[in-house]
Structure formats: structure tokens, C-alpha cells
Image: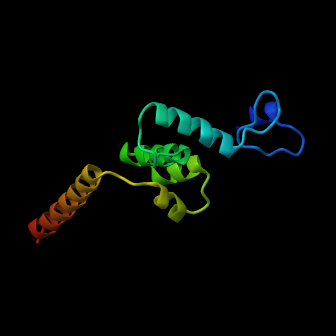
Amino acid sequence: METVRPLLAVEGNSALWPSERGPRIGLARIDRRFATYRDALGLDPGLDFHSLRRSYATYLIEDGYDPLFVQFQLGHEHASTTSLYTCVSSDFRVRTMRRALGQAVNAALNVKGSI
């Protein structure tokens, strides 16, 4: 980011997505273009460009990436903000719960076995 953005930056423009021609590519323009593609593909009208960001965060968490890494990827100062972005699947929640319960049961059995 630090090496590419300065090459495209226009004085006083802190745009997240500057174009090679200099003017800012605004979120409204990106949203309109995304909506055109979404509608052409027959996808749910509730799907917006920001959904991609939420999906990215969710997939990273479900794929086992460290939550702090995900937080940094999204540029969030607080983990609580990142947690709002992640909408993990019920399968992931079940797997996580089973793993945690399995660890708790194994730890309890090991404690009893050592007495």
C-alpha cells in the first residue's frame, strides 16, 4: 500500500481507490457498477459492494487465520469492530464448539486420571 498509493496519489487526495488518471473513484460509483453486475447476474439485491469486505473477513476467520491478522487486514483499530464484520456459518460455529468441548472433556479426563 505504501509503495503503490504514492504513485497514483494526487496532491490532497487521500482516496482509497485513486485511478491512474488522478481523480478519485468514489464509493458511489463503485456501488453503482457493482449493482449493475449484481443485477445482470440475478443476485440478491441486498448484496452490495461492502458485502465483499464482510465476506473476506468471514472467510479468513473460517480458514483459521489469526483474528489479529484479520483485524489488521481490515484496518480496524479494535477487535470488536472486526467481530461485527464476521458472520461465520453455522457449520463453522458447530466445528468450533465441538473442538472447544473436546478440549475441555480431554482436559477434565486427564486431570481425573492423574489423581
**Location of residue 60 in the rendering, given as x and y in whole percent from the top left corner:** 44, 44
Colour scheme in the image?
rainbow
Residue in view at x 46 percent, y 53 percent = 67
The total of numbered circles placed on residues is 0
The correct choice, above or below, for 99 with respect to 14 in the image is below
> Which quarter of the figure has residue 30?
top right
The x and y percentages for residue 69 are 52, 48
- Image point 75% across, 31% down: which residue? 19
Q: Answer with the quarter of the image where residue 55 lies.
A: top left
State the residue at coordinates (15%, 63%). Answer: 105
Instruction: State the residue lying farthest toward the top.
Output: 20
Give x and y (percent) for residue 5: 76, 36
95 over 43 or under it: above or below: below
Q: Foreground residue, 93 or 104?
A: 93
Tell which of 73 and 90 is nearer to you. 90
Q: Position of residue 58 (x, y in %)?
A: 42, 48
Quadrant where the C terminus lies?
Answer: bottom left
